[in-house]
């Protein structure tokens, strides 16, 4: 009886070790994905800023420039 209980505890201990290893690997994968996504978001934000600057440099109606300056999205009529 004591031997059976000991074996059960050993098995449970091994299962918990495996579960902890899997959990740690999963957390590392999440961190890696988060860093990758953060980099992509930063690159996209930079590109939006560059494109906004180029748009403002194009000779355009003054209402487009003023709309962008206050952070509003210009309408298609303002762009044309």
Image (cartoon, rainbow, N blue to C red):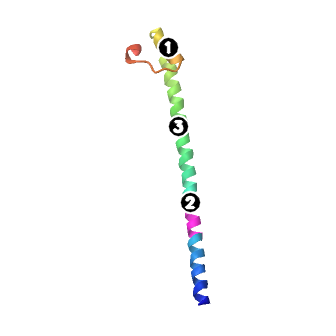
Q: What element carries label 2?
A: helix
Earlier along the polypeptide chain: callout 3 or callout 1? 3
10 Å neighbourhood of mark 3: few (<14), some, or many (≥20)? few
Magenta segment:
17-22
Residue 25, percent from left and from top:
56, 60
Q: Is residue 42 above or below residue 74?
A: below
Asked whether the residues under the numbered discs 1 and 2 touch, taking CB atoms below 8 Å apart as contact, a structural biologist would say: no
- Label 3 vs label 2: CA separation? 24 Å
Q: Check disc 1 and report the residue beneath it.
A: 65
In the rendered image, residue 67 lying in the magenta stretch gets the answer no
Mark number for residue 5?
A: none
Earlier along the polypeptide chain: callout 3 or callout 2? 2
Report whether residue 58 is seen: no
Mark number for residue 25?
A: 2
Report the front residue among 16 and 44: 16
Q: Check disc 3 and report the residue beneath it.
A: 41
Which residue is at a point 53% across and 48% down the rendered structure image?
Answer: 33
Residue 18, percent from left and from top:
56, 69
Left or right: residue 16 compared with residue 62: right
């Amino acid at each position: 009886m004591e031997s059976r209980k000991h074996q059960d505890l050993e098995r449970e201990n091994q299962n918990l070790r495996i579960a902890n290893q899997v959990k740690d690997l999963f957390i590392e994968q999440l961190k890696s994905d988060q860093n990758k996504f953060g980099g992509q978001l930063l690159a996209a934000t930079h590109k939006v800023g560059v494109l906004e600057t180029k748009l403002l440099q194009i000779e355009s109606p003054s209402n487009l420039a003023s709309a962008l300056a206050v952070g509003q999205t210009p309408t298609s009529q303002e762009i044309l």
